[in-house]
Image (tube, helix red, strand yellow):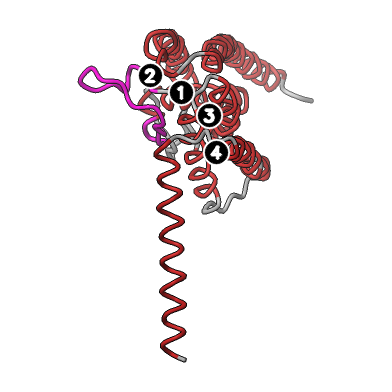
Amino acid sequence: MINPRVFESLKAKAEQDLAVRAKLDSIIETLERNVAYTQGVLSRVHSTPRARYQTALLPAVDAAVADEVATVRELSTVASAHPYYKFNHRWTRHLQDAIFTVLLAAWLGGVSTLSSEGSKPAVGRLLTLEEVGEVFGVPVEIDHDAFHIALEEYLSALTSLTDELGRLAMNAVTLGDGELAVRISKFVKDLHAGFQLLNLKNDFLRKKVDGVKYAVKKVEGVIYDLALRGLLPAEEKEGEAKEAKKEASTSEAAADSKMSEA
């Protein structure tokens, strides 16, 4: 009643599918190990003074990121030969973690592939989605069905970056680096403001973005404690004084205007 060749064909397709999944999973497992190692290296930032980043931390970070980059490129080569949306759920979480490590490494002044004319980027740099794609050597947000870094993966990695920087702000103060805590405070506030401009449809991503406000509050608490103890950097105090003076001048001008009107 049924032609047995139908099931023979289905069996062949199923076996081909299994072979593709096995090959992808092998690469993804390697990526997972690489990311875990890179995160371990990056965790040293919480006990390393900023003055020693270039010598004691970033060379090891850049080497670890290089291994991630090589694995992501291998994954891209294999995955691009198959339907993207059929298999992308297998690697997206690990790719988000890899993007996070690159974002953090670049923020700290690392990722050697970004250096130009032998100089390292300054602490506090935020890589764009396109720059992340350049680091990994893979396309971003493309229309055709091939491996790429999706916008959602980049945004999710940004939320992880704010969490980690919130932790770094507290540990920077422990290391006597109030200036770094202030820089982190400004950075995460700018990120949070940027997130408010997005109209996100992805429920999971929207919840992660909503959580950024807690990182902002954490850092604000650190800065508040510094202010109470009179430990804010000198330029930050000057900035606050100028801002207060500006607000006072505005208030006086408003009062004078009302008096003249009266």
SS class, disc 4: helix
Label 1 neighbour load within 10 Å: few <14, some 14-19, many 20+ = many
- Magenta stretch: helix, strand or loop mostly: loop
Residue 231 appears left or right of 257:
right
> Of marks 4 and 2, which one's residue comes earlier in the chain?
2
Residue at the image position 56 percent from the left and 34 percent from the top: 162
Mark with earlier residue (4, 1)? 1
- Say which residue label 3 marks: 83
Amino acid carrying label 3: it is Pro
Residue 152 position within the rendered picture, expressed as x and y whole percent measured from the top left:
55, 38
The residue furthest right is: 1
Disc 4 crowd, CA 10 A, few/some/many (<14, 14-19, 20+) = some
159 sits left or right of 54 in the view: right
Mark nearer the viewer, 3 or 4: 4
Q: Which residue is disc 4 drawn over?
A: 152
The alpha-carbon separation of the residues under discs 1 and 3 comes to 26 Å
Residue marked by disc 1? 102
Is 1 above or below relative to 203? above
Using the image as rendered, state which of residue 9 and residue 44 is in the foreground. 44
Helix, strand or loop under label 2: loop
In magenta, the rendered stretch is: 109-131
Within 10 angstroms of label 2, few (less than 14), some, or many (20 or more) residues? Answer: many
Q: Nearer the viewer, mark 4 or mark 2?
A: 2
Residue designated by label 2: 111
* Viewer-closest of 28 and 68: 68
Label 3 SS: loop
Q: Is residue 218 above or below residue 31?
A: below
Amino acid bearing label 4? Glu
Which residue is nearer to you in this view: 23 or 156? 156
Separation of disc 3 and disc 4 at Cα?
Answer: 19 Å
Judge left or right: residue 143 versus residue 32.
Answer: left
